[in-house]
Image (tube, rainbow, N blue to C red):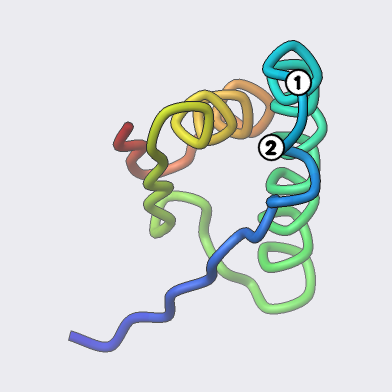
């Protein structure tokens, strides 16, 4: 199976105070939505083919991206 894997490095946003990291989840979700929109618009890539995987707050970021961009194929967290 031909796949691409993109890692979201949000160390800067997830470190420090937990409350700050929680607030940054929405920003990460918005950036992931931006990426999906870019892939869809410029490359014709369907959001239904995307699988977000996250752990802990990363799972919340994946969920936020899915909330912002309906039609994501799968979210695992």
Task: Give the quadrant of the N terminus.
Answer: bottom left
Real-space Cα separation, disc 1 to disc 2, in angstroms = 8 Å
| Residue 17, numbered circle | 1
The residue indicated by pointer 2 is 14
Picture coordinates of residue 17, whole percent (x, y) = 76, 20
Picture coordinates of residue 71, whole percent (x, y) = 49, 36
Secondary structure at numbered mark 1? loop
What residue is shown at x 70% (from left), y 51% (from top)?
A: 10
Q: Is residue 66 left or right of residue 14?
A: left
Q: Is residue 30 left or right of residue 29?
A: right
Q: Nearer the viewer, mark 1 or mark 2?
A: 1
Q: Is residue 45 left or right of residue 28?
A: left
| Residue furthest to the top | 19
The quarter holding residue 5 reads bottom left
Disc 1 packing (10 Å; few <14; some 14–19; many ≥20): few
Picture coordinates of residue 75, whole percent (x, y) = 36, 37
Secondary structure at numbered mark 2? helix
The residue lying toward the viewer, choosing from 48 and 34, is 34
């Amino acid at each position: 199976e031909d796949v691409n894997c993109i890692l979201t490095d949000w160390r800067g946003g997830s470190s420090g105070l937990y409350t700050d990291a929680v607030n940054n989840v929405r920003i990460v979700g918005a950036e992931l939505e931006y990426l999906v929109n870019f892939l869809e618009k410029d490359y014709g890539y369907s959001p239904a083919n995307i699988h977000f995987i996250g752990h802990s707050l990363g799972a919340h970021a994946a969920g936020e991206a899915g909330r912002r961009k309906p039609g994501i194929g799968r979210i695992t967290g």
